[in-house]
Image (spheres, helix red, strand yellow):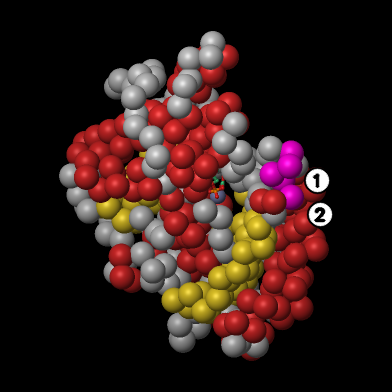
C-alpha cells in the first residue's frame, strides 16, 4: 500500500528545488498552506556571464542548500518529526544542479525514513496555482488549460484531473522566456532578460511591427522569427528607442501566447485557464490574458511563477496514490517530459 495514504493528518511536505540557478526549500501543508518558502538566488553570479553557467550553478547549490534547509525548517517552526514527506525536482533541468537537490532529498529520506517524492519541474510550475496565495486559496477547477511559459518551455496543456495532462502545443524553437532573454541581450537591457523587458516596456509604446508566427491550425509556438527580426533591426541601426522596441517585442510575444491559449480554452470548453512558469510573472501577459480569456484566469503571484520549492511541495501533495513514493535509486532526468 502507498505509504502516503497512511497519514490521517494534513500532510506537511518539505520541498527542494535545484533544477537551474535558484536553490529553493519550502515547507507546505496540504499542498496549499506555505509555512516557509526560501530561495537563494544565483542571479548576480550568472549575470556577469549573461546566462547560467551550469558548473557554477551546481557548485552554488552545494554551498547554499544545507543552510537554506535549516532556515526553512526554523522559519516554519518545525522539527523532522513534523515532516511527512520530502519532495524534490528530478527533472527537467541541468543535470549537475538537479543532482544536488536529489542527493540531499535522498539523504533526508534515508536518515529520517520519510517518503521521497520525485516531482517534474513543469508539474511544479502548474501546481503553484494550488498554493493558498493564488485565487484566495480556492483550488483550480478541472478541466482546465494551463499555459506553461518558462526559460525552457512554452507549452499549452489540457489538464483533466490531478496528474492527467495532454500536451496540446509546444514551442518549435525558442521558449518564450528564452526569447525574452535573447531580445533583452540584443537590446542591451541586461540579464535576466524577462524582467528587464517587462520594466523597459512600461516606458514605451509598441510602435514597431514585428512578425507573429501564428502557426494556424496548431497549438504550437515559434518565437525565433520575432527575435531574428529584432536582431536585424538593431544591426541595421533602426532602433531609436529601446523602450518602444521592448514594448513591441513583448506585445508580439504576448499576442500569440494569449490568443492561442484563449482559443484552446474555447475549443476544449474548459472551466479555467492557468498560467505558470517564469514568464507568467510578465505584467502585460497577466493583464491581457485576463482580458482575453473566455473563462476565469488563475495566475500565481510573481514570486511563485519563477522557480521556487513551495510549488514542488504542492505538486507532490496531489500525486496520485501508487505513483508517489520513490526510493534511493531515484535519478535525475534532465530531459524529463510531462507525462
Ligand atoms: O520558470 P523559470 O523561473 O525558470 C525555468 O524553469 O526556466 O523561468 C525563467 C524565465 C526566464 O527566461 C526569465 O527571463 C523569464 O522567465 N521571466 C520573465 C519575467 N520574469 C521572468 N519573462 C517575461 N517577463 C517577466 N516579468
Ligand atoms: Zn522553472
Q: On the rendered image, what quadrant is the N terminus found in?
A: bottom right
Residue 250 appears in the figure: no
Above-or-below relation of 219 to 202: above
**Mark 1 and mark 2: Cα distance apart in space:** 6 Å
Left or right? Give the position of 91 relative to 131: right
Q: Main secondary structure of the magenta part?
A: helix
Residue bearing the label numbered 2:
59
Q: Quadrant of residue 139?
A: bottom left
Residue visible at 52% across and 42% down in the picture: 196
Disc 1 element: helix
Count of numbered tags: 2
Q: Residue furthest front?
A: 240
Residue 298 or residue 219, whichever sits in front: 298
Which residue is depicted at the point 34% across and 32% down? 205
Say whether residue 275 is left or right of residue 141.
Answer: right
Q: Disc 1 marks which residue?
A: 55
Which region of the structure is painted magenta?
Answer: 45-49
Q: Is residue 219 magenta?
A: no
In this view, the residue in front, 130 or 319, is: 130
Classify 78 as above or below 179: below
Q: In the image, is the residue at mark 1 within 8 Å of ligand 1 by its beta carbon?
A: no
Across and down, in percent, residue 276 comes to 43, 50
Q: Measured from the top left, where is residue 182 in percent x and y?
A: 57, 30
The x, y position of residue 262, in whole percent, is 25, 39
Amino acid at each position: 500500500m502507498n505509504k502516503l495514504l497512511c497519514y490521517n493528518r494534513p500532510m506537511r511536505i518539505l520541498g527542494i528545488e535545484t533544477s537551474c540557478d535558484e536553490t529553493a526549500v519550502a515547507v507546505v501543508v496540504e499542498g496549499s498552506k506555505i509555512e516557509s518558502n526560501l530561495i537563494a538566488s544565483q542571479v548576480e553570479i550568472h549575470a556577469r556571464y549573461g546566462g547560467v553557467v551550469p558548473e557554477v550553478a551546481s557548485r552554488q547549490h552545494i554551498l547554499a542548500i544545507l543552510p537554506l534547509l535549516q532556515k526553512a525548517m526554523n522559519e516554519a517552526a518545525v522539527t523532522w518529526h513534523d515532516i511527512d514527506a520530502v519532495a524534490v525536482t528530478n527533472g527537467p533541468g541541468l543535470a549537475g544542479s538537479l543532482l544536488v537537490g536529489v542527493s540531499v532529498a535522498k539523504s533526508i529520506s534515508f536518515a529520517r525514513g520519510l517518503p521521497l517524492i520525485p516531482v517534474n519541474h513543469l508539474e511544479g510550475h502548474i501546481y503553484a496555482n494550488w498554493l493558498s496565495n493564488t485565487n484566495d486559496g480556492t483550488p483550480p477547477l478541472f478541466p482546465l488549460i494551463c499555459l506553461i511559459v518558462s526559460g525552457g518551455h512554452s507549452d499549452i496543456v489540457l489538464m483533466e484531473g490531478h496528474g492527467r495532462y495532454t500536451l496540446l502545443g509546444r514551442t518549435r524553437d525558442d521558449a518564450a522566456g528564452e526569447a525574452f532573454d535573447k531580445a533583452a541581450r540584443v537590446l542591451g537591457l541586461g540579464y535576466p532578460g524577462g524582467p528587464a523587458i517587462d520594466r523597459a516596456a512600461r516606458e514605451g509604446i509598441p510602435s514597431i511591427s514585428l512578425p507573429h508566427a501564428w502557426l494556424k491550425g496548431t497549438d504550437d509556438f515559434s518565437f525565433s522569427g520575432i527575435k531574428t527580426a529584432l536582431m536585424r533591426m538593431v544591426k541595421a541601426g533602426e532602433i531609436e528607442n529601446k523602450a518602444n522596441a521592448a514594448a513591441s517585442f513583448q506585445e508580439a510575444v504576448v499576442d500569440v501566447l494569449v490568443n492561442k491559449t484563449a482559443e484552446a480554452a474555447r475549443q476544449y470548453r474548459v472551466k479555467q485557464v492557468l498560467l505558470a512558469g517564469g514568464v507568467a510573472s510578465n505584467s502585460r501577459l497577466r493583464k491581457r490574458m485576463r482580458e482575453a480569456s473566455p473563462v476565469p484566469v488563475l495566475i500565481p503571484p510573481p514570486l511563485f511563477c519563477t522557480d521556487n520549492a513551495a510549488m514542488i511541495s504542492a505538486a507532490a501533495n496531489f500525486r496520485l496514490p501508487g505513483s508517489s513514493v520513490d526510493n534511493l535509486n531515484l535519478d535525475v532526468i534532465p530531459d524529463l517530459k510531462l507525462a
